[in-house]
Amino acid sequence: MLDNDPALSLKGLTVAYDTEPVLWNVDLEVPAGVLMGVVGPNGAGKSTLLKAVLGILPSLAGAIRVFGQPYSAQRTLIGYVPQRSSVDWDFPTTVLDLVLMGTYGRLGWFRRPGNAERKAARQALERVQMAEFANRQIGELSGGQQQRVFLARAFVQDAPLLLMDEPFAGVDATTEQTLVDLMRELRQKGKTLVIVHHDLTTVCEYFDQVALLNRKVIGAGHVSNVFTTELLEKTYGGSLNQCKVACRQFSTLTSESISRNQDGHADD
C-alpha cells in the first residue's frame, strides 16, 4: 500500500443481474482520506457498486483495486456497513458479539477474541454511546442504535477503507448528526469513507467528495466541482424535484463554507 495509491480504483466495472446491466463501464477513483458520498436515483446501482467491490456480487468486466492491489489481497483493509434492511436482526447475537466480529479479520479463523479484543469492543461502544447496550440482543435496538453498533464494529476493525450503504436511512436527526460526527472523526484519523446517500440536500454539508451515479459515473470529485445543476440533471433525468431543491441549496453555499466542510483537503 503506497501513500499515493487511491483508496479505491474501479476501471470499466460492469455488473448485471441476469442479462440486465446494472452498472456499465464504471470508472471511479476515490483518493485516500476523504469522505465521498455516492448519490443517484433509485435503481442507479449504488448498493450494487459496494457489493461488487466486496465480491458479494460478481462483475462481468472491469478491475477493482484497493490501495493499488486487487481486492483479494486487500480484503482485510475494507470495512462494510450494510443497509439495515439487509440484516437479519433476529439473529441470536448480542451487541458486544456483533462488535467483536470486527476483530475476526486480524485474528484469523482459528483464534477466538480474548480480553484485549473485548476491551477494544467495549471502548468502541463507548465512543458511539452504546456501552450500556452491550448485552442486549441486536433485534431489540432502534434503527439509529443499530447503525451506531455497526459503526462501533468499524472502529474495532480499524480498516482504512469503510463502505457504508445508506447509514442514515430510518434514523432521527440527532442520531444522523452523531453518525456524521463519528464519520468525520474516522476521516480525521486518515480513514477513507465511501457512503451511499439519498438526501441531496445534505451532500454539501456532509461530504468533501461526491460520485454521481446512474448505472455509470456521471461525475466524481470535489463537491464544489461535481455537485452542479448540469451534472445533477444528467444524473436524475426527469426526476428533478429533489434535484432542483439541492441545486438551489448548492447555489447559496459560499466557497468559504465548502472549504470548511472539506477540512483542508486540497484539490487533486
Image (tube, grey):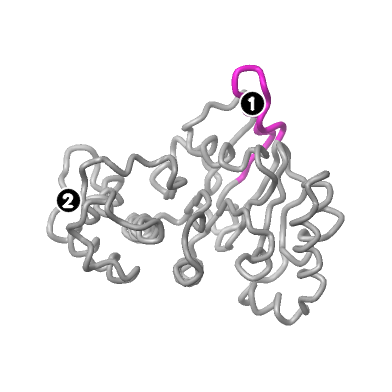
Give the x, y percent position of residue 159: 41, 54
- Under circle 1, the secondary element is strand
74 or 150: nearer the viewer: 150
Which stretch appears magenta? 9-25
Amino acid type, callout 2 = Pro
- Under circle 2, the secondary element is loop
Q: In this view, does 260 lie to the left or right of 175?
A: right
* Quadrant of the snapshot with the C terminus: bottom right
Q: In which quarter of the image is residue 264?
A: bottom right
- Does 136 appear above or below 216? below
Give the x, y percent position of residue 80: 43, 48
Give the x, y percent position of residue 220: 72, 53
Identified at 53% across, 26% down, the residue is 58
Mark 1, residue position: 61
In this view, the residue farthest toward the right is: 230
Give the x, y percent position of residue 48: 57, 36
Total marks placed: 2
The reply to whether the magenta stretch includes residue 21 is yes
- Does 162 appear above or below 63? below
Q: In which quarter of the image is residue 64?
A: top right
Residue 238 numbered tag: none
Q: In this view, does 144 lie to the left or right of 260?
A: left
> Is mark 2 in CB contact (under 8 Å) with mark 1?
no
Dominant SS of magenta comes to strand
Residue 113 numbered tag: 2
Which circle's residue, 2 or 1, is located before the other in the chain?
1
